[in-house]
């Protein structure tokens, strides 16, 4: 056994002494290029892709329209226990005329309202991070996730979102970055698609023109 081990180690040493050229030439890797989209095109692309993933999209031309649509949704669903940890978002909603009583318990709430870092138009995804007050769990544990975003947060692709996130946070890059792409789903159970097993059953996105 020891002789075999020594033979293997000897072969490794010999291989390290003689450099072997790489089997493939060095090819510069260029990022995939997509046609640049205007702001309106980004909005349409995100709305289409997000809706195709069973997300519920609402466009708001201003803050007043956001309040009206959000209030209508809350009343229609009869949501009493609304969870929201983001102070700025709470203040903005209150200033705009929507006074809500927020629940303290995430696990028993009717829905959770959060902001986001960016919206990725190409995949219809909401990019979230632990740097926000909502933290790691708010958008995951609630039965319904309501995201309020602004047109200035729209980006074309995931690469764009990550680059802007890096520029925004610098050396304090968030310890967790996640993409919410529609309601949670799994096909592990007899290969049947089931929605809302390990996360929110519904995801709403209100996009406010800014």
Image: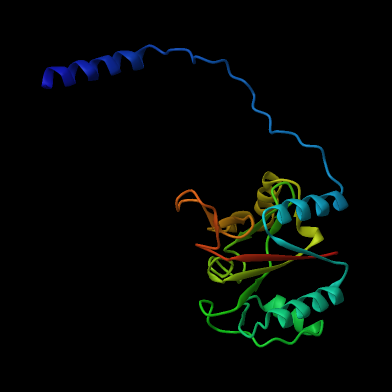
Relative to 63, is 24 on the left or the right? left
Residue at image x 69%, y 52%? 167
> Residue 26 at x, y = what percent?
58, 19
> Residue 11 at x, y = what percent?
27, 14
Question: Looking at the rendering, which quadrant does residue 94 occupy?
Answer: bottom right
Residue at image x 63%, y 77%? 84
Relative to 177, is 52 on the left or the right? right
Front-lying residue, 109 or 169: 109
Question: Looking at the rendering, which quadrant does residue 29 occupy?
Answer: top right
Front-lying residue, 111 or 4: 111
> Residue 152 at x, y = what percent?
80, 59
In the image, is residue 118 above or below residue 137? above
Question: Looking at the rendering, which quadrant does residue 117 occupy?
Answer: bottom right
Q: How is the image coloured?
A: rainbow
Indicate the quadrant containing the C terminus: top left, top right, bottom left or bottom right.
bottom right
> Residue 93 at x, y = what percent?
76, 80
In the image, is residue 204 above or below residue 64? above
Residue at image x 62%, y 60%? 128
In the image, is residue 60 above or below residue 26? below
Indicate the quadrant containing the N terminus: top left, top right, bottom left or bottom right.
top left
Number of numbered discs overlaid on the protein picture:
0
């Amino acid at each position: 056994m020891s002789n075999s081990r020594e033979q293997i180690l000897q072969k490794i040493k010999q291989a390290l002494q003689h450099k072997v050229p790489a089997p493939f030439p060095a090819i510069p890797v260029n990022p995939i290029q997509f046609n640049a989209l205007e702001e309106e095109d980004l909005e349409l692309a995100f709305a289409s892709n997000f809706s195709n993933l069973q997300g519920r999209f609402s466009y708001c031309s201003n803050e007043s329209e956001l309040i009206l649509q959000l209030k209508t949704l809350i009343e229609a669903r009869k949501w009493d226990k609304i969870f929201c940890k983001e102070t700025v978002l709470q203040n903005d909603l209150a200033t705009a005329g929507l006074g809500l009583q927020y629940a303290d318990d995430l696990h028993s709430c009717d829905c959770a309202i959060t902001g986001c870092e960016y919206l990725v138009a190409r995949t219809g995804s909401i990019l979230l991070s632990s740097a926000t007050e909502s933290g790691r769990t708010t958008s995951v544990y609630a039965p319904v996730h309501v995201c309020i975003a602004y047109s200035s947060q729209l980006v074309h692709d995931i690469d764009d979102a990550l680059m802007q996130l890096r520029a925004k946070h610098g050396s304090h890059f968030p310890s967790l970055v996640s993409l919410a792409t529609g309601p949670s789903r799994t096909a592990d159970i007899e290969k049947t698609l089931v929605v809302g097993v390990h996360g929110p059953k519904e995801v709403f996105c209100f996009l406010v023109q800014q």
